[in-house]
Image (cartoon, rainbow, N blue to C red):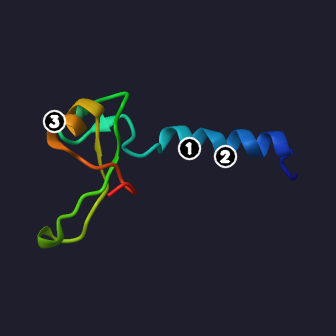
Amino acid sequence: MTPTPEQAKKAARTPDARTEPSHGWCHWHNGTSGTAILISVIESTSGPGYAKYACQPCREQRNLVPFGQA
Ligand SMILES: [Zn+2]
């Protein structure tokens, strides 16, 4: 039986909420945050880059640049 569009939408929404990336986590103070956003990390000397999130206070203290605004 084919799921109705409504069922499909519900099924798609559930995993999204659970697998939400590091949003809400600040890698700089290592804690949760409601203001954490993706930061463009330039660390060419230490291997491949990876996504890091920083909250607003940490961004201001460390002059971090939001991803895409560098
Ligand atoms: Zn922080």
Q: Quadrant of residue 29?
A: top left
Q: Secondary structure at mark 3?
A: helix
Is 24 situated left or right of 7 in this image?
Answer: left
Q: Secondary structure at mark 2?
A: helix
**Mark 2 residue crowding within 10 angstroms, few (<14) / some (14–19) / many (20+):** few
Is 33 situated left or right of 2 in this image?
Answer: left
Q: Secondary structure at mark 1?
A: helix
Which disc number belongs to residue 61? Answer: 3
Camera sees residue 30: no
Q: Is residue 47 above or below residue 32?
A: below
Q: Type of residue at label 3?
A: Gln
Of the pair 20 and 58, the residue shown nearer to us: 58
> In 3D space, how far apart are the residues under numbered discs 1 and 3 (Cα atoms)?
32 Å
Q: Quadrant of residue 31?
A: top left
Q: Residue at x 40, y 57 (%)?
A: 68
Which disc number belongs to residue 38? Answer: none
The picture places residue 59, in percent across and down from the top left corner, at 24, 39
Q: Residue at x 32, y 58 (%)?
A: 70
- Check whether the beta carbons of the residues at disc 1 and disc 2 lie within 8 A of each other: yes
Q: Earlier in the sequence, mark 2 or mark 3?
A: 2
Q: Type of residue at label 2?
A: Ala
Q: Nearer the viewer, mark 2 or mark 3?
A: 3
Q: Which residue is mark 1?
A: 16
